[in-house]
Amino acid sequence: MNNLGVDNVYKQLGLIAMGLTASTASFAADNAQLQKEIEQLKAENKLIMERLDATTEMVEKKSTSNAAGGSKVHISGYGELHYNNWDNQNPTGSDKEEFDFHRFVLEFGYDFTDSVRFRSEVEIEHALVEDTDDGSGPGELELEQAYVEFDIADNQSVKGGLFLVPVGILNETHEPPTFYGVERNPVESNIVPSTWWEAGAAYTVRFANAVSLDLAAHSGLNTSSGSNYAVRSGRQKGAKAQANDLAYTARLKWSGIPGLELAGTLQHQSDITQNNDATAGAATLIEVHAVWQKGPFNLRALYATWDLDGTGPAAVGADEQTGWYIEPAFRINPKWGVFARYNTWDNQAGNGVDSEYSQIDAGINYWPHPDVVIKFDVQDQDAPAGNDEFDGFNLGIGYRF
């Protein structure tokens, strides 16, 4: 090879070397820029993750979820709208045709620890609360529950504050999707005066053989001769409740067979008028009930009776106030169910005069969702002579969440 050929080879090699050097420099510059962008993305991603962690922590603290292991804060509620169309069989009385948003309820709770918790329930009745001097407004704003509960041992707890009295079927569980009929049954309104809440303290123990015992000491009723000592009129609702005479309640409940609940409640109060009526005295309530669920068939039955001491209650027959009902129901499928119920009650059963009410109800429930219900029923009432006696139908919609 001559010198000219060698020079050309060297020139070509030089050009290749220069190209490689330039490419390497360019690659290094691009790689440096890429590394810079990667580091920037890492920093941004770290910031995003920190913000996400903070947001997640905030949501977990403030979430209203009731799921296990979820938030300490709990929010739930229920409500129901009713339409009543009743013909009064008493010629001197008035018919009833009205819409009423009977209840709007919000429930708030907080778990301080796994063994200390707070529960409350605030209710607006009849949609509108008016500030009237004589209390004649159509609605009420009520604090029905507000208590702190402590687990003191396995299957044992105590609570103090404002709570539902452990009695009857509906008093503690009365959300609209859980029962049949637009209106609550009249026995658990007039004899067991649901919804019935008091201020005080309670102890609950659950035994291994499906037996539970509730013991409570709480504010009592304050009835008067002006209402013929009717127990429902004596509820003080924890509002500056007179406490001259406390009430003591004990309930024993057994659920040892799946689908079956048997329970009984005993309550005693030394003076049902809080020492405001010298002619009245002690009052004792006995209530027993059974709930049986067998496949699509359901049966509820309840009996309750009051015994009031004193010449005042005896003079108007209120020394005995008694009622009972039986309610068979059949769930056609998950969305439809039918029921019938016979009720009888008497708040003046101690006299010789006919003062007993009876009522037959029958109807249907439709659940478009397990927590939403649409109800229709008819009622046929038999009242003592001279009293309002309502026959007709009811339509309602209710929910819980």
Image: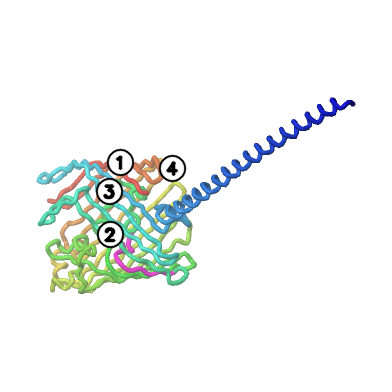
Q: Which mark is residue 183?
A: 3
Q: Which mark is residue 144?
A: 2
Task: Give the image quarter of residue 243.
Answer: bottom left
Residues packed near mark 3 inside 10 Å, few (<14), some (14 to 19) or many (20 plus): some
Vertical position of residue 78 compared to residue 16: above or below: below
Main secondary structure type of the part rendered in magenta: strand
Q: Which secondary structure lies at badge 4?
A: loop
Which badge, 3 or 2, comes first in the chain's sequence?
A: 2
Q: Which secondary structure lies at badge 3?
A: loop
How many badges with numbers are in the image?
4
Q: Mark 2: which amino acid? A: Glu
Q: Which secondary structure lies at badge 2?
A: strand
Which residue: 33% across, 53% down?
A: 174
Q: Kindly identify which residue carries mark 1.
A: 376
Asked if marks 3 and 1 touch (Cβ < 8 Å), the reply is no
Quote the CA–CA distance across marks 1 and 2. Answer: 27 Å
Quote the CA–CA distance across marks 3 and 1. Answer: 10 Å
Residues packed near mark 1 inside 10 Å, few (<14), some (14 to 19) or many (20 plus): many
Which badge, 4 or 3, comes first in the chain's sequence?
A: 3
Which residue: 31% across, 43% down?
A: 397
Q: Nearer the viewer, mark 3 or mark 2?
A: 2
Q: Mark 1: which amino acid? A: Phe
Q: Mark 4: which amino acid? A: Pro
Asked if marks 4 and 2 touch (Cβ < 8 Å), the reply is no
Task: Give the image quarter of residue 282.
Answer: bottom left
Question: Which colouring convention does the figure follow?
Answer: rainbow
Q: Kindly identify which residue carries mark 4.
A: 334
Quote the CA–CA distance across marks 3 and 2. Answer: 19 Å
Asked if marks 1 and 2 touch (Cβ < 8 Å), the reply is no
Task: Give the image quarter of residue 229.
Answer: bottom left
**Image location of residue 290, percent across then percent down:** 38, 58
